[in-house]
Amino acid sequence: MKTPSSAGRAVVADLRTITLFLYRYGWYSYDPALETREKAGWRTARKLARALVVAAASGWRAQWRPDGPECRSCACGEETCACCRAGPHGTLKCVLRTRAGRELASLGGICAAEPDDERVVKAWLALQALSRPQRRPAWRY
C-alpha cells in the first residue's frame, strides 16, 4: 500500500480544516424528509471544500469589485447585522477567474461581505464552475 506524500497529507489536513470552516459558516438547504440539517450541512461543506481545493490547485482567483445597485439595507432587523446598521451603501460582485483571466462564475449584489463570507462565496463559485463540464480542469480531484 502506498503511503501518502507529505503534500498529500497537507491537502487532506487542509481539506478537513476547510470542511469544518464551511460547515460552520457556509450556507445550505435541505429537505427534512430526506436528511437532517446536520447531515445536509456536512454534505454541502464537503462539496464546497473539494471545490475550493481544486480552485486553489488550478490557480483560480476571486476578484471583488463594486457592483451596480446601491443596497438600501435589509429588513432582518438584527442589531448585529452590518447591513442594517450601515444605511444606504454599495454592493459587491465576486468574479472567479482562471489563471489566464477567463471568467468562470460570478455573483453580484453582495452586501456587507465579511472575510468569512468572501471565502464561502468563493467556494460556491468554484463549485458552480466545476459543475459546468466545459470548465472542469483536465484532472479530477
Image (cartoon, rainbow, N blue to C red):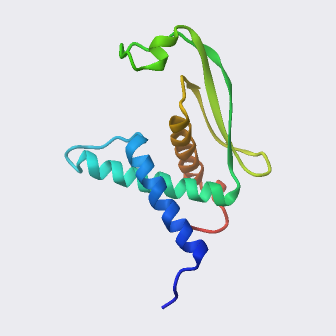
| Residue at image location 23% in from the left, 50% down from the top | 34
Quadrant position of residue 122: top right
Say if residue 73 shows up in the picture.
no
Rendered position, 35 above or below 70: below
The location of residue 98, given as percent across then percent down, is 73, 50
Give the residue at the far bottom of this rendering: 1
| Residue at image location 58% in from the left, 76% down from the top | 6
Give the residue at the far left of this rendering: 33
29 lies left or right of 7: left
Give the residue at the far right of this rendering: 100
Q: Nearer the viewer, residue 105 or 133?
A: 105
Question: How many labels sit on residues?
Answer: 0
The location of residue 11, given as percent across then percent down, is 55, 66
| Residue at image location 48% in from the left, 17% down from the top | 83
Say if residue 106 shows up in the picture.
yes
35 lies left or right of 5: left
Quadrant position of residue 118: top right
The location of residue 67, given as percent across then percent down, is 66, 22
| Residue at image location 68% in from the left, 51% down from the top | 60
45 lies left or right of 63: left
Q: Quadrant of the C terminus?
A: bottom right
The location of residue 108, given as percent across then percent down, is 60, 28
